[in-house]
Amino acid sequence: MVARILTGSSIRGLINYNESKVNIGTATPILASKFGLDIEQLELRHKVARFEHLTKLNSRVKTNAVHIMLNFDPTEILAIEKMQILAVEYMNGIGFGEQPFLVYKHEDANHPHIHIVTTNVKADSTRIDLHNIGKVLSEKTRKELEMKYNLIRAEGHGKELQITPINIDMANYGEKQTKRSIYNVVTAVLRSYKFTSFSEYNAILKCFNVIADRGPEDSVMFAKKGLVYSILDSDGVRIGIPFKASSFAGNPILTKIESKFKLNLEKRKNHAESLKHIILEQVKKINGSTSKQLIDRLGKKGISLIYRQNNEGRIYGLTYVDHNTRCVFNGSDLGKQFSAKAVLEILKKPEAQLSEPTNRNTKTRTNQSPDSSFLGDDHDKSSGDGLLHFLFEKPVSDPGSPLMRIRKKKKKKAVSKNRDLSNNI
């Protein structure tokens, strides 16, 4: 069994998240403790009111929402009654036995698991300390329950990495309610994938026919860090009406997305080498294939390859979305041999090898520099990666340029041996 504890400041948001899963048929409420009614008798308003009554008793407690996930091995078949018992005994073990809590059985993954929603504000307005609750209480309780009920043991964090969600359903316009389809994709991506920039986040969403848009850079929405989500058709064109990020349960707004960048940067490090190996293997077998064929080859290995283009249709970068490890990398992050220039040269010259370095310098014309959009229609300047790359790029010297002629002329006008070197620049 793997236990995971998350905390937040919106108990209503946690309830809405689980109830939305119930509405679409991927979750079932199985227990309500300390509510005075059976779970089948409770309406949404009862659930929210019970928790908000406690949180209002102590407004100084900002982190007052607790979301716990108990994950079991895929081979374990657990009856509802056993899940209920495990939930109650686990909550007793971590000191939440007297708190009201709701238990939901989720069926959106390939392993049995339950979600528990509660608050750490007690009836006497004091709070339950959450500091180190995972190490001190949860880990001890987890091991005791594994032994008592003969559950398959979780061998450290490695076991948690083996528990993976099932494939995310593509958002197809007209098949389901548009907002619900977008929500399912966004929630799964935020929970499971490791991205380090807004463009990488969008690269993943587009794999499932969804796009996040900040609006034009000169718009009020962009200035105020606004965000809307839209569904895409088979050609990658927006269809239907967009929805504000703040209107979704879980609040997938820009600040929440950006807060994951630094953490994901560390999380994805261990998965770069495996991705490199798969790419090397496929590119070396290209033999004159087209860029579309390379996309298909990598797709069969569970990797989405996305070509980033400027307004003129010129490819300036590659993004690799590894659905096996749920990590996303730009080609330049993996190394020069995985960049757009190196891979495109191999596509043109099938005899070349991916490991061969390319030493030729190329000039960037001002009218060919990539714009801020990702595949032409969403903004990427929030990360600043492209701008930093341009600023630190070594300039290409052109002896025939006006600047070089001016420099030569200034050198000829030197009038003193002691003249400061800076005057020659």
Image (cartoon, rainbow, N blue to C red):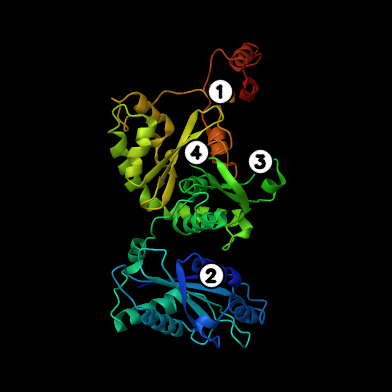
Res 290 seen here: yes
Q: What residue sits right under mark 3 in the picture?
A: 216
Element type at marker 4?
A: loop
Q: Could you classify mark 2 by the number of other residues whose Cα lies within 10 Å: few (under 14), some (14-19), or many (20 or more)? A: some
Nearest to viewer (mark 1 / mark 3) = 3
Element type at marker 2?
A: helix
- State the residue at coordinates (28%, 33%): 284
Position in image of residue 40 (x %, y %): 51, 81
Q: What residue sits right under mark 4 in the picture?
A: 235
Nearest to viewer (mark 3 / mark 4) = 4
Q: What residue type is labelled 1?
A: Arg
- State the residue at coordinates (50%, 28%): 314
Q: Nearer the viewer, residue 166 or 371?
A: 166
Task: Tell me which label, 1 or 2, sits earlier in the chain.
Answer: 2
Q: What residue sits right under mark 2 in the picture?
A: 19
Task: Tell me which label, 3 or 2, sits earlier in the chain.
Answer: 2
Task: Tell me which label, 1 or 3, sits earlier in the chain.
Answer: 3
Position in image of residue 255 (x %, y %): 60, 55
Task: Tell me which label, 4 or 1, sits earlier in the chain.
Answer: 4
Q: What residue sits right under mark 1 in the picture?
A: 365
Task: Tell me which label, 3 or 4, sits earlier in the chain.
Answer: 3
Q: What whole-number distance in Å separates the C-alpha atoms at marks 1 and 2?
A: 53 Å
**Quadrant location of residue 410?**
top right
Proximity of marks 2 and 4: CB atoms separated by less than 8 Å? no
